[in-house]
């Protein structure tokens, strides 16, 4: 059965759509199902931010078909791994946890890589170079996640 991975940020328009696109590009869809969600409801139904679409496209990944949705407690039963971009959103996700099983599957995504940085910076108010930094961080994290999932 496929492993299911959920990427979570605040708006589900900048960081988690990039993470979803990168991990999808590194894994076989028969083996790994990847989705993303936001803890907020600010941008429900919207496409990813044009700057996220542009950065992903520059690296050969098309995320333009993704649409924003909000994280719900049901996601704990739907997904095997939930990777959150920063401490603030981690707190919001963990606040919805009902049991230890859910706690074990919920991680900061940068815990998967050996970096001093523990949070993927929110690029929403940045220029495009902030998005390239986000892409590079998420690329490293997804490499490590895909190796762990042992597919492709
Ligand atoms: P994301 O970035 O959490 O990486 O999608 C943000 C997107 C929107 C907002 C903040 C962060 N906002 O305040 O609308």
Image: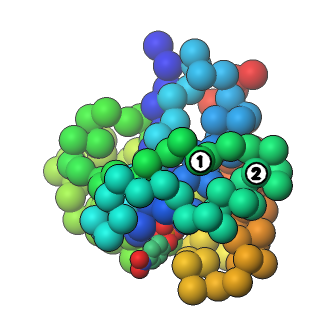
Q: Quadrant of residue 88?
A: bottom left
Direction from residue 139 to residue 88 in the image, left or right: left
Q: Label 1: how many residues lie within 10 Å, few (<14), some (14-19) or many (20+)?
A: some
Percent from the top left, x then y, of residue 83? 49, 53
User: How is this picture coloured?
Assistant: rainbow
Residue at image point 72% right, 54% down: 56
Kindly identify which numbered label has been placed on residue 81: none
Quadrant where the C terminus sits is top right
Tell me which label, 1 or 2, sits earlier in the chain: 2
Percent from the top left, x then y, of residue 60? 81, 44
Kindly identify which numbered label has been placed on residue 57: 2
Q: Quadrant of residue 94?
A: bottom left
109, 43: nearer the viewer = 43
Q: Is residue 131 above or below residue 78?
A: below
Total labels drawn? 2
Direction from residue 109 to residue 36 in the image, left or right: left
Residue at image point 46% right, 31% down: 4
Q: Please, what secondary structure does the residue beneath circle 1 have?
A: loop
Q: Quadrant of residue 151?
A: top right
* Residue 133 can be seen, yes or no: yes
Q: Please, what secondary structure does the residue beneath circle 2 have?
A: helix
Q: Label 2: how many residues lie within 10 Å, few (<14), some (14-19) or many (20+)?
A: few
66, 102: nearer the viewer = 66
Residue at image mark 1 = 64
């Amino acid at each position: 059965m496929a492993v299911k991975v959920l990427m979570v940020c605040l708006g589900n328009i900048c960081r988690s759509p990039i993470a979803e696109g990168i991990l999808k590009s590194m894994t076989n869809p028969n083996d790994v199902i990847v989705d993303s969600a936001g803890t907020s409801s600010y941008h429900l139904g919207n496409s990813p931010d044009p700057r996220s679409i542009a950065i992903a496209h520059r690296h050969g990944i098309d995320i333009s078909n993704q649409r924003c949705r909000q994280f719900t407690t049901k996601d704990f039963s739907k997904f095997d791994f939930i990777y959150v971009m920063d401490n603030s959103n981690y707190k919001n996700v963990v606040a919805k946890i009902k049991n230890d099983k859910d706690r074990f599957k919920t991680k900061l995504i940068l815990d998967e890589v050996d970096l001093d940085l523990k949070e993927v910076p929110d690029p929403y108010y940045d220029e495009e170079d902030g998005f390239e930094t986000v892409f590079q961080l998420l690329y490293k994290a997804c490499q490590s996640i895909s190796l762990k999932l042992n597919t492709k």
